[in-house]
Amino acid sequence: NAGVMQNPRHLVRRRGQEARLRCSPMKGHSHVYWYRQLPEEGLKFMVYLQKENIIDESGMPKERFSAEFPKEGPSILRIQQVVRGDSAAYFCASSPRGIEVGSGNTIYFGEGSWLTVV
Amino acid sequence: AQSVTQPDIHITVSEGASLELRCNYSYGATPYLFWYVQSPGQGLQLLLKYFSGDTLVQGIKGFEAEFKRSQSSFNLRKPSVHWSDAAEYFCAVGGNNDMRFGAGTRLTVKP
């Protein structure tokens, strides 16, 4: 049973270009979470999606960032017109259902996508 | 709002010494708590988790953590550190449809 798959693992973009990061959740998982890890900082929640729906995007920057999780295919985190400050590791996680206290449910992380903006 | 604080940014211990990484949380309801480890350039691996029941939880790689509600803490411990334990450790608190992480503690192991 494959885990959460993220690609590309490493991506280099010039300032002003677009970055697209893909996340295929574990089989049977319909909930996806994106986190960003900036150098010397912890993991910051960005967005929580279910199939075709954005449930919580309170951690997403207001501009240039968007996320989707279509009915078919992987979840995509899209960053338009990248700037140097976007350089970070972006982690995707998935769970079979929404995390509910006491449910014993756990989210599973991918290995991350490292974005470098030059 | 829920939050997690890891007071120690960087800790150095000698190989074979004991380890304790601190984690304090703020959460309005019954939390559930996690510790993850991240090796350089790697993803996150779950070490252990607490949902309910026994407040001392055992994890992989010889780690354990103790939930103390009165202190809002969930500290990670290991009796004898190995050089391969050098990594970044993240504490996380979760609630309904959400999970928040601390800033991480970087562990260096001296020979």
Image: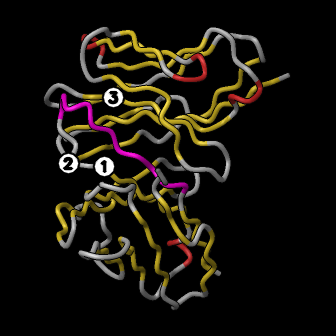
Label 2 sits on what residue type? Gly
Which tag is nearer the camera, tag 3 or tag 2? Answer: 2
Q: Kindly identify which residue carries mark 1.
A: A95
Circle 2 chain: A
At horizontal 61% and vertical 76% (from top left) the residue drawn is A11
Q: Kindly identify which residue carries mark 2.
A: A98
Distance from disc 3 to disc 2, alpha carbons, whole Å, reads 16 Å
Q: Which mark is residue A117?
A: none
Question: Which scheme is used to colour this image of the protein?
Answer: secondary structure
Secondary structure at numbered mark 2 = loop
From which residue to which does the magenta span run?
A101-111
Q: Residue furthest bottom?
A: A16
Q: Relative to the observer, which residue lies in front, B34 or A72?
A: A72
Q: Residue furthest front?
A: A1
Label 3 sits on what residue type? Leu
Task: Give neighbour class at mark 1: few <14, some 14-19, many 20+ (Cα, 10 Å).
Answer: many
A111 shown above or below B54: below
In-image side of A83 versus A107 (left or right): right
